[in-house]
Amino acid sequence: MKQPLNHVFGSICVFQSLGPESCVTSPMRSVGVKQTMDHTAIELMGTDRPGLLSEVSAVLTNLKCNILNAEVWTHNTRAAAVMHVTDEETGSAISDPQRLSIIKELLCNVLGGGNKKRGAKTVVTDEATHTERRLHQMMFADRDYERVNDDDDFAEKQRPNVNVVNWSDKDYSVVTIQCKDRPKLLFDTVCTLTDMQYVVFHANIDAEGPEAYQEYYIKHIDGSPVKSDAERQRVIQCLAAAIERRVSEGLKLELCTTDRVGLLSDVTRIFRENSLTVTRAEVATKGGKAVNTFYVRGASGFPVDSKTIESIRQTIGNTILKVKGSPEEMKSVPQDSPTRSLFSGLFKSRSFVNFGLVKSYS
């Protein structure tokens, strides 16, 4: 059954939740640093490649930064991340301008290799924006919706069906979206419409079953509907990209252990050494525990071999790193072997934000 989003109540709740200045797209930045009372936020934007997260986390660890939380997305050859770090010694935000400058410079060097046209830049910002909201803004501004290859498997099998038509007797454009349902789908589409400076006046949402149906009645903030075929195509491209960014390609790995400085660097290094690439990651610290989720694929894009995953789990610790979903062969969860217990201790010695906006509809 379709569930209407009331214009007055729905738009106020949705747009307030999107964060300050939600109707204005912030400029893209490849590396940005901002400070709060308890941590320093680092924004990264660059060309995706195998081992990138490992290299970034290694740089931060070498610079005596502790990664508290991080969200990493990849889409259409691009990678974006928002990381919250503290000083290793003090446990507080990093305030020294010279040190911040070094951090940005070294991270730019890591991100800069690969695509000269869309290389890394450094920008300092004091904006306060929800992490996932900011990731959408960064990738939208980076134009990740301009596809590099329309013949890939994702395009053929999972591309969402997005359509835009003008309502003949009203000054609205009607956007319809049909795709596989998943958490935060409504958040992702509304974020993108807002960043494109459209206002949603009415919406119908059907989230029953495996497929989701969304219908939005929109106008541009200047009061006009979609004016041209070029604008219509851009809306379709941008909404499809917003949905695809959070689609979890690859095998899901969950890590839970005592947090320590350098943990993310060590784990992602092991992934890299075993020819795995991270397509999405959620890194959180809560009550002294690291609760991390990784989606990984083979570096060549092929599915991950079960023997490779089993070897990685033996190295990190079978009770520390768990596999969700395929491969089918990995249904049992063996205990740590005595021969690995000392190495697993390395990980023992050495917060994902649940945004409630779309809880009822996602």
Image: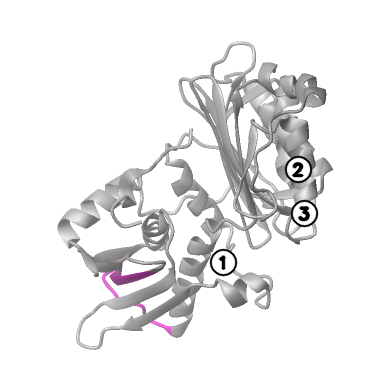
Q: Residues within 10 Å of mark 1 (few under 14, many from 20)?
A: many
Q: Is residue 148 left or right of residue 247?
A: right
- The amino acid type found where label 3 is placed reads Asp
Q: Secondary structure at mark 2?
A: helix
Please say if the residues under marks 2 and 1 sit with CB atoms less than 8 Å apart.
no
3D distance between C-alphas at marks 3 and 1 = 31 Å
Q: Disc 1 marks which residue?
A: 145
The span picked out in magenta is 212-228
- For the residue pair 209 and 190, the one nearer the viewer reads as 209
- The amino acid type found where label 1 is placed reads Tyr
Asked if the magenta segment contains residue 223, the reply would be: yes
Query: Between disc 3 and disc 1, whose residue precedes?
Result: 1
- Position of 77 relative to 155 (above/below): above
Query: Between disc 2 and disc 1, whose residue precedes?
Result: 1
Q: Is residue 103 left or right of residue 240?
A: right
Query: Between disc 3 and disc 2, whose residue precedes?
Result: 3
Q: Disc 3 marks which residue?
A: 305
Q: Secondary structure at mark 3?
A: loop
Q: Is residue 209 left or right of residue 237?
A: left
Residue at the (26%, 69%) spot, across then down: 204
- The amino acid type found where label 2 is placed reads Glu
Q: Disc 2 marks which residue?
A: 310
Asked if the magenta segment contains residue 27, the reply would be: no
